[in-house]
């Protein structure tokens, strides 16, 4: 794959990075959403986007991107989970915290997938 094609594909709306999927899988496990957790495992195993030959970290899993092929209902469950986590991590007077901002960013990434569908 050429670098230009790789850059175009990784910016598509149905693509997420490894770190996002790793955190999503962790939170799905904590929230006993094991069916969706298995779907994230499947995406990591089957939907990796091939890196270009000259990629500076070809064997580093942290730099991988994946095509997301979940249906809208599955994505909505993940969005709802991250929304609950964001609200649950607000401060005493509902002020934002580091954790709330982190979960808000995760929510935004998954919510953008719904806009794509």
Image (spheres, grey):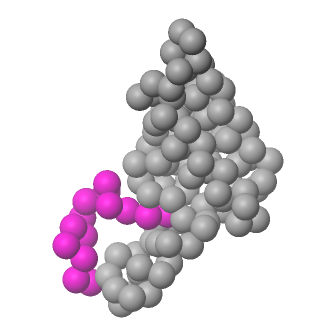
Quadrant of the rendering where the N terminus is positioned: bottom left
State left or right for residue 115 relative to residue 37: right
Q: Residue furthest top?
A: 92
- Residue 113 in the image: above or below residue 10: above
Q: Is residue 3 above or below residue 30?
A: below
Asked if residue 101 is among those painted magenta in the image, a careful observer would answer: no
* Figure quadrant of residue 37: top right
Answer with the quarter of the image where residue 117 lies. bottom right
Magenta-span inclusion, residue 62? yes
Residue in the foreground of this view, choosing between 90 and 68: 90
Q: Position of residue 91 (x, y in %)?
A: 51, 15
Q: Main secondary structure of the magenta part?
A: loop
Asked whether, in this view, residue 13 is left or right of residue 96, the answer is right
Residue 109 on image: x %, y %: 57, 52
Image quarter of residue 33:
top right
Q: Looking at this rendering, what residue extends furthest in the right direction?
A: 73
Give x and y (percent) for residue 43. 55, 56
Residue 25 in sight: no
The residue stretch that appears in magenta: 53-66
Question: Measuring 40% from the left and 48% from the top, which residue is drawn there?
Answer: 19
Residue at (62% x, 24% y) in the render:
87
Give the residue at x 21% y 67%: 57
Residue located at (73% from left, 61% from top): 115
**Of the pair 76 and 60, the residue shown nearer to us:** 76
């Amino acid at each position: 794959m050429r670098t230009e094609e790789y850059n175009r594909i990784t910016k598509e709306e149905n693509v997420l990075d490894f770190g996002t999927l790793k955190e999503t899988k962790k939170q799905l496990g904590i929230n006993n959403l094991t069916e969706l957790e298995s779907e994230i495992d499947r995406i990591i195993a089957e939907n990796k986007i091939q890196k270009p030959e000259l990629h500076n970290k070809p064997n580093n899993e942290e730099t991988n991107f994946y095509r997301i092929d979940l249906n809208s209902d599955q994505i909505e469950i993940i969005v709802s989970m991250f929304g609950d986590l964001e609200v649950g991590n607000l401060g005493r007077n509902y002020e934002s915290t580091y954790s709330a901002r982190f979960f808000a960013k995760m929510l935004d990434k998954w919510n953008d997938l719904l806009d794509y569908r």
